[in-house]
């Protein structure tokens, strides 16, 4: 291999500005790219910088994902050697009567969270953006629940939800003459109780994002609307919401993906009870893997995880296809 | 030059991280050449005195066995954590498992064979044969040391009994009397007169206890390795109807219906529950881990009707099958010393009782004999001077328990079926219109499906 000295081989001084003809030289350079040029161009150093990230993601994310994929076709308790069962795990999961319950419960949670949890941060953000004084204080107050560690928040709310007449919420309801509610202790009220806490816990993060997006709305649009005689509601409807459209779409899909994977609340609040009223898909996965003390059914657990991942993948793809068309329109 | 140095630093950082990751794996072995033996101690939350007593016993053992370094590991058997620890290989070298899991574990090859060790120690024939059967595999080998057995009992709060105008020295003896007492307690004190566990598989466990006491048999062993579910029977139905009526007609079960072993103990220790059923040995945990004042505690036998029996259980000290010979030998020494000798040998029993009572730990909590009854009664005499539990508040149990018929937990898919039965208890306690017949029929079908897998 001959080493013809060329201008590209000699590394430019680090502080030198990029030559103006760099863009036009690019195709030429890529034609002559060899492992040696990659090496001399600092490829190894790039790799060294990338290594920590690659290792962390590889060990803690990609390797478990790959293992889970393989495991969904095996029967294993992680102690005895695994056996290949191919699609048996999928068939068993699909014939489990609890799957229907879990899917319906998850959809119920998602629907409640969408109806109550999705508009709330938007309304709050719009109202807060209208406030002239103490905006920072309101933002901090709204964001506070996000700072509380989720497990602590749930355990705290569990105390609030004490169903006896002297429970925190029941005492407050008593002041206005409402009889004590069973909260988590009844199949009918358990899921709405979970949604209330989840909304409280998540709203702060969304409010901050919406507030940031609202700042980006050009004030001239509001001025123009005002000149045209628009009131506050018409301004929100015709200026704010259309301007937030992009961010609303993103937040909506994030919320759908998030609620489809709800686990923490049912796990900590109710363990899926009463009588499976709050059993969600992720909790069912957890039960497959860990409820049986004798090793669990990791094959079924990973099979259901894989199905959920595929479902969410398709959902996201469809969603972006649809919203793409709407945004271009 | 500057960038080279940066790259070098990045490289070192990457290497350091790989090193740190590698260090996550278990080290094993001890620095001073001693053999390190990791043994289970107490569940999380045990008070300092318990650890002090353990440290004293650890010192005594290490003095007698200078080549072994005992490392106590916090341990509690719960279904989800046990599965994860088993899979992750992070269980201690010596730990305990309940009878319910023993058969499956040993048949899966997940427990160490200790037949020869028990023979060498010379007390294989001393075990209560019913209990030894719990740890014997189909190959006839023994896979653990039964170390403690209990029968379920009815625990009651003497303080609430008095507040409600009931006599704490005359606890209820029939389920109807339990219901009447529960109603009185709820009306007079505003606390739950009666409560039952309902989640984390414990709902199924206690439903079995209460149904068995009414003469239920929840499963038939066909003798060929298969089982038939018989959960849908009159006694189970009567039990569920009873719970339903206490909850909805009498309103005497309080407002919390998702209790498990830990939370029901907590509520009971805090004086919020009048009566509940659980293992007879729970006094130790109530006082040691949940801070219950001992003078409020009362224990009697579970009412038995229609030739019902009292469900018992227990746990065994075991080792994972992966231990090397040296560690296994040390583990057997520890099990023999820590768990077994105090049942067999006067000096060991006295030393153990002394160490526990010196740290104000309960001595003399009622249990059932794992060895023959004579040895058990004799061992109770040895430790008599050190007994510090209020045995006079437990006479209802200690006087009556040997007259009751002991019943073992059903063997097929015990824990998964308990999980199914949790839903039955939750349903009748949280839904006034729960259709008990339909629920029972469904659980029976689901249980049979598990048994047929």
Image: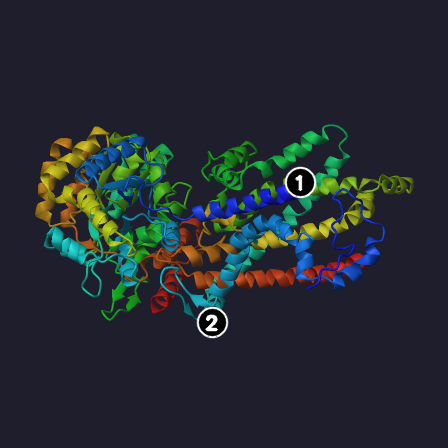
Residue drawn at the location 28% of the way across and 34% of the way down: B50
Query: Does any portion of residue B303 appear in the rendered image?
Result: no
Residue drawn at the location 20% of the way across and 66% of the way down: B139
Looking at the picture, how far across and down is residue B338, in whole percent? 20, 42
In the image, is residue B363 above or below residue B199? above
Relative to B208, A125 lies left or right: right
Relative to B219, A75 lies left or right: right
Query: Does any portion of residue B133 appear in the rendered image?
Result: yes
Q: Quadrant of the C terminus of chain B?
A: bottom left
Looking at the picture, how far across and down is residue A1, in whole percent? 68, 64
Q: Quadrant of residue A84?
A: bottom left
In front: label 1 or label 2: 1
Cα separation between marks 1 and 2: 54 Å
Residue drawn at the location 55% of the way across and 37% of the way down: A148
Q: Nearer the viewer, residue B215 or A138?
A: A138
For label 2, count other residues whose C-alpha is less than 10 Å away and answer few (under 14), some (14-19) or many (20+): some
Q: Nearer the viewer, residue A218 or A203?
A: A218
Q: Quadrant of the N terminus of chain B?
A: top right
Label disc, if present, on residue A86 of the rendered structure: 2
Residue beneath disc 1: B2
Determine the chain carrying the residue at label 2: A
For label 1, count other residues whose C-alpha is less than 10 Å away and answer few (under 14), some (14-19) or many (20+): few
């Amino acid at each position: 291999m001959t080493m013809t000295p060329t201008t590209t081989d000699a590394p430019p001084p680090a502080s030198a500005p990029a030559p103006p003809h760099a863009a036009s030289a690019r195709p030429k350079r890529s034609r002559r790219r060899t492992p040696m040029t990659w090496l001399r161009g600092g490829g190894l150093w790039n790799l060294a910088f990338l290594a920590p990230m690659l290792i962390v993601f590889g060990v803690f994310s990609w390797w478990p994902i790959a293992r889970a994929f393989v495991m969904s076709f095996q029967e294993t308790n992680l102690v005895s050697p695994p056996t290949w069962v191919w699609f048996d795990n999928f068939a068993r999961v699909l014939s489990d009567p609890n799957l229907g319950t879990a899917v319906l419960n998850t959809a119920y949670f998602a629907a409640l969270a969408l109806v109550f949890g999705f508009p709330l941060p938007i309304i709050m953000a719009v109202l807060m953006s209208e406030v002239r004084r103490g905006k920072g204080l309101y933002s901090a107050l709204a964001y506070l629940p996000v700072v509380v560690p989720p497990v602590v928040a749930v355990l705290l709310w569990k105390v609030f939800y004490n169903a006896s007449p002297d429970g925190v919420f029941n005492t407050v309801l008593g002041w206005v003459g409402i009889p004590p509610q069973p909260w988590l202790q009844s199949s009918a009220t358990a899921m709405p109780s979970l949604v209330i806490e989840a909304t409280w816990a998540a709203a702060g993060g969304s409010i901050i994002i919406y507030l940031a997006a609202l700042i980006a709305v050009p004030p001239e649009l509001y001025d123009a609307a005002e000149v045209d005689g628009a009131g506050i509601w018409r301004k929100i409807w015709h200026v704010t919401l259309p301007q937030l459209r992009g961010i609303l779409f993103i937040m909506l899909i994030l919320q759908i993906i998030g609620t489809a994977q709800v686990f923490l609340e049912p796990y900590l609040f109710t363990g899926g009870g009463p009588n499976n009223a709050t059993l969600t898909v992720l909790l069912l996965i957890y039960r497959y893997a860990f409820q049986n003390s004798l090793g669990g059914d990791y094959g079924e657990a990973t099979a259901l995880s894989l199905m959920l991942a595929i479902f969410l993948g398709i959902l996201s793809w469809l969603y972006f296809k649809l919203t793409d068309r709407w945004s271009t329109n | 030059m500057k960038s080279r140095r940066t790259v070098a630093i990045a490289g070192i950082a990457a290497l350091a991280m790989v090193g740190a990751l590698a260090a996550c794996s278990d080290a094993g072995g001890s620095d001073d050449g001693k053999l390190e033996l990791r043994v289970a101690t107490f569940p999380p939350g045990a008070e300092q005195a318990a650890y002090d007593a353990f440290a004293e016993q650890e010192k005594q053992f290490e003095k007698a066995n200078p080549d072994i370094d005992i490392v106590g590991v916090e341990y509690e058997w719960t279904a989800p954590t046990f599965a994860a620890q088993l899979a992750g290989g992070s269980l201690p070298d010596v730990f305990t498992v309940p009878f319910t899991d023993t058969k499956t574990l040993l048949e899966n090859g997940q427990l160490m064979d200790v037949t020869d060790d028990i023979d060498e120690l010379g007390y294989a024939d001393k075990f209560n044969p019913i209990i030894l059967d719990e740890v014997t595999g189909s190959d006839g080998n023994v896979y653990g040391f039964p170390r403690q057995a209990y029968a379920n009992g009815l625990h009651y709060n003497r303080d609430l009994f008095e507040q409600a105008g009931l006599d704490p020295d005359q606890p209820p003896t029939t389920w109807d009397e339990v219901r009447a007492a529960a109603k009185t307690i709820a009306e007079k004190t505003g606390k739950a007169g009666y409560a039952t566990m309902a989640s984390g598989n414990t709902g199924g466990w206690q439903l079995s206890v209460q149904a068995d006491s009414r003469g239920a048999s929840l499963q038939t062993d066909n003798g060929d390795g298969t089982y038939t579910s018989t959960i849908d029977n009159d006694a189970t139905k009567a039990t569920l109807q009873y719970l339903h009526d206490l909850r909805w007609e009498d309103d005497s079960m309080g407002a919390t219906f998702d209790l498990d072993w830990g939370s029901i103990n907590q509520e009971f220790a805090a004086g919020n529950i009048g009566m509940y059923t659980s293992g007879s040995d729970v006094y130790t945990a109530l006082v040691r881990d949940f801070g219950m004042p001992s003078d409020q505690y009362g224990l009697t036998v579970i009412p038995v009707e229609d030739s019902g029996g009292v469900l018992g259980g227990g746990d065994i000290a075991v080792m994972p099958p992966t231990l090397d010979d040296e560690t296994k030998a040390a583990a057997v020494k520890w099990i023999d010393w820590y768990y077994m000798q105090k049942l067999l040998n006067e000096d060991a029993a006295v030393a153990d009782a002394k160490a526990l009572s010196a740290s104000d730990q309960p001595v003399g909590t009622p249990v059932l004999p794992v060895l023959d009854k004579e040895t058990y009664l004799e061992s109770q005499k040895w430790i008599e001077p050190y007994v510090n539990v209020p045995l006079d508040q437990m006479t209802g149990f200690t006087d009556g328990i040997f007259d009751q018929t002991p019943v073992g937990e059903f063997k097929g898919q015990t824990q998964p079926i308990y999980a199914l039965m949790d839903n039955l208890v939750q349903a009748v306690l949280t839904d006034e219109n729960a259709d008990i017949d339909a629920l029972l029929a469904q659980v029976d079908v689901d249980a049979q499906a598990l048994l047929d897998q």
